[in-house]
């Protein structure tokens, strides 16, 4: 299986990358089941990348149904060290307007019962997650977006809700009172699992609309949101292409050793089946 260092996860509206050349399609098996779809391997700006449609081609998978572990594990199996993840979001602030792009550096979890760790089953680990986004990837992506002429806000908090229904107005106003910036349904679990897999991770949050708190909400139509989604998808692709061109082969952050002090369980006490499943993730620390 071909190994690549760069991964792209496309969210709502971003089911493919037009710039991908020299394409091949590969299915990746994981101990956690099947990823959302086959991966498209291709070249962008001279770099080999792996692209995954988060919700599957044709948008078949609800946020609560996503197999986040399989998606991130498959990226790891392909050799990916950096992931750029695009996601449609609603704005919770007047100053963050539709068609803006926000690069969050924090998350708040409002999901219920989603699996967001590779660990358990006899192996305990606790990663540091105070700063959930790779700082080097954040800085490079913001510079690339600015150079590409796309209005992009660096930093902010992404509230991850359960869905699939959108917020009530009361919930939306509650989240605003907490100081949240945008709201979406997918990226928190990806960020946690990427950190456990020692993969650099960044969310490119594509603002399609104001959440239901806004006084103009009633005038927003589905057609308007879809149009914004299409425009944001084009902008996201421009940012991703520009960012990939800036990335060196060697990482300069600490994401690659996130598990160094996180594993808690005595090696002799870890079940053999758990070791087998997680060898790709923890093997270098338990050899």
Image: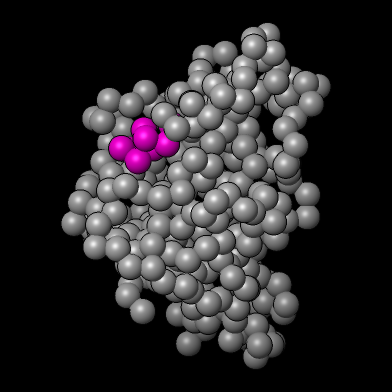
Dominant secondary structure, magenta: helix
Q: Nearer the viewer, residue 210 or 252?
A: 210
Percent across and percent down for residue 15 are 46, 49
Name above or below for residue 82 compared with residue 148: below
Q: Is residue 112 left or right of residue 266?
A: right
The residue located at (35%, 41%) in the rendering is 237
**Image quarter of residue 123:** bottom right
Q: Nearer the viewer, residue 141 or 53?
A: 53
Percent across and percent down for residue 68 are 60, 60
Q: Which residues are magenta?
A: 232-239
Number of callouts: 0
Assign the N terminus to one quadrant of the image. bottom left
Render colour scheme: one colour
Q: Is residue 165 left or right of residue 220?
A: right
Residue 133 visible in this rendered orientation of the protein: no
The residue located at (23%, 46%) in the rendering is 246
Percent across and percent down for residue 75 are 45, 65
Name above or below for residue 41 compared with residue 166: below
Residue 68 visible in this rendered orientation of the protein: yes
Q: Is residue 164 magenta?
A: no
The residue located at (63%, 62%) in the rendering is 67
Q: Is residue 208 left or right of residue 177?
A: left
**Image quarter of residue 93:** top right
**Outermost residue, left direction?**
46
Q: Nearer the viewer, residue 58 or 181?
A: 58
The residue located at (64%, 12%) in the rendering is 219
Percent across and percent down for residue 13 are 49, 40
């Amino acid at each position: 299986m071909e190994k690549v260092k760069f991964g792209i996860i496309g969210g709502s509206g971003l089911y493919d990358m037009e710039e991908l050349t020299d394409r091949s399609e590969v299915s990746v098996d994981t101990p956690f089941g099947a990823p959302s779809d086959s991966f498209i391997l291709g070249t962008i700006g001279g770099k080999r990348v792996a692209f995954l449609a988060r919700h599957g081609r044709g948008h078949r998978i609800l946020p609560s149904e996503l197999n986040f572990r399989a998606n991130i594990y498959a990226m790891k199996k392909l050799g990916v060290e950096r992931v750029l993840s695009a996601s449609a979001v609603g704005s919770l602030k007047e100053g963050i307007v539709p068609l803006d792009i926000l690069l969050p550096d924090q998350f708040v979890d409002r999901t219920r019962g989603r699996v967001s760790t590779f660990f358990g089953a006899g192996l305990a680990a606790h990663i540091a997650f105070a700063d959930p986004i790779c700082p080097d990837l954040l800085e490079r992506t913001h510079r690339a977006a600015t150079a590409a002429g796309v209005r992009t806000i660096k930093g902010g908090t992404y509230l991850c809700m359960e869905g699939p229904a959108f917020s009530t107005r009361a919930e939306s106003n509650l989240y605003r009172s907490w100081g949240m910036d945008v709201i979406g349904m997918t990226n928190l679990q990806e960020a946690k699992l990427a950190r456990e897999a020692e993969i650099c991770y960044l969310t490119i949050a594509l603002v399609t609309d104001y959440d239901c708190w806004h006084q103009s909400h009633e005038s927003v139509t589905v057609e308007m949101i879809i149009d914004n989604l299409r425009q944001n998808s084009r902008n996201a692709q421009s940012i991703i292409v520009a960012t990939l061109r800036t990335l060196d082969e060697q990482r300069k952050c600490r994401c690659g050793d996130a598990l160094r002090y996180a594993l808690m369980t005595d090696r002799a006490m870890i079940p053999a089946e758990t070791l087998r499943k997680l060898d790709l993730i923890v093997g270098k620390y338990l050899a």
